Image (cartoon, rainbow, N blue to C red):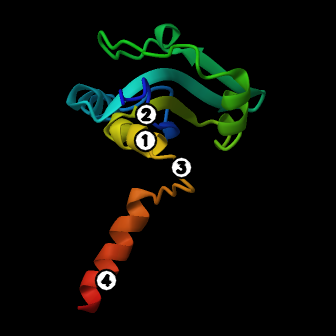
């Protein structure tokens, strides 16, 4: 069986202070894409103001991502922006990234071919994982 065209996809709302992300954030995203860990399908800038939620496509933001190609530009819809952007505090900005988990495409393909399904997938935020691991190590 040939692999699926796309693996699992996540929408990641990455908030930051100010109107644009730190250069290190952009670099981290580009490093993941370059390494083949994720494929960036779409990317929009979201801001929550006192008047509501605003969003701009990447080419309208002035945020420099180099020559990155979005493999699914336009996937993020207004409903996505409103739902996720509504989680931001007033005055905050974020990148809404649509990332394909490239590393999981082969597994998803084989699972589908075997008649299986992913029943659930839980993401534990990195700060939580680090705190729990540190606590467990301290207990040893």
Numbered label attached to residue 7:
2
Q: Residues within 10 Å of mark 1 (few under 14, many from 20)?
A: some
Image coords of residue 39 (percent x, y):
36, 26
Element under disc 3: loop
The residue tagged 3 is 117
Question: In the rendered structure, which disc, 1 or 2, sits on the residue that comes first in sequence?
Answer: 2
Q: Residues within 10 Å of mark 2 (few under 14, many from 20)?
A: many
The residue carrying mark 1 is: 108
Give the quadrant of the N terminus.
top left
Instruction: Locate residue 21: give its quadrant.
Output: top left
| Position above or below: 68 against 133 | above
Is the residue under label 2 in contact with that under label 1 (CB below 8 Å)?
yes
Q: Give the mark nearest the N terminus, 2 or 4.
A: 2
Residue under the point 52% across and 51% down: 118
Q: CA distance from mark 3 to mark 4?
A: 32 Å
Residue 136's disc is: 4
Mark 1: secondary structure: helix
63 is higher (above) or lower (below) than 13: above
Q: CA distance from mark 3 to mark 1?
A: 8 Å
Expressed as whole percent of the image width and height from the top left, the position of residue 6 reads 44, 27
Mark 4 or mark 1, which has the lower sequence index?
Answer: 1
Secondary structure of the residue carrying numbered label 2 = loop
Residue 3 spot, x, y in % from top left: 37, 29
Q: CA distance from mark 4 to mark 1?
A: 32 Å
């Amino acid at each position: 069986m040939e692999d699926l065209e796309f693996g699992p996809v996540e929408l990641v709302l990455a908030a930051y202070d100010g109107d644009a992300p730190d250069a290190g954030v952009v670099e981290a995203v580009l490093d993941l894409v370059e390494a083949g860990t994720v494929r960036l399908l779409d990317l929009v800038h979201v801001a929550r103001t006192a008047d509501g939620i605003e969003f701009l496509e990447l080419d309208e933001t002035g945020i420099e991502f180099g020559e990155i190609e979005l493999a699914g530009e336009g996937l993020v819809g207004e409903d996505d922006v409103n739902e996720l952007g509504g989680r931001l505090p007033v005055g905050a900005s974020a990148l809404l990234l649509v990332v394909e988990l490239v590393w999981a495409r082969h597994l998803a393909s084989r699972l589908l071919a075997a008649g299986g399904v992913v029943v659930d997938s839980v993401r534990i935020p990195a700060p939580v994982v680090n705190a729990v691991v540190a606590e467990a190590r301290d207990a040893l």
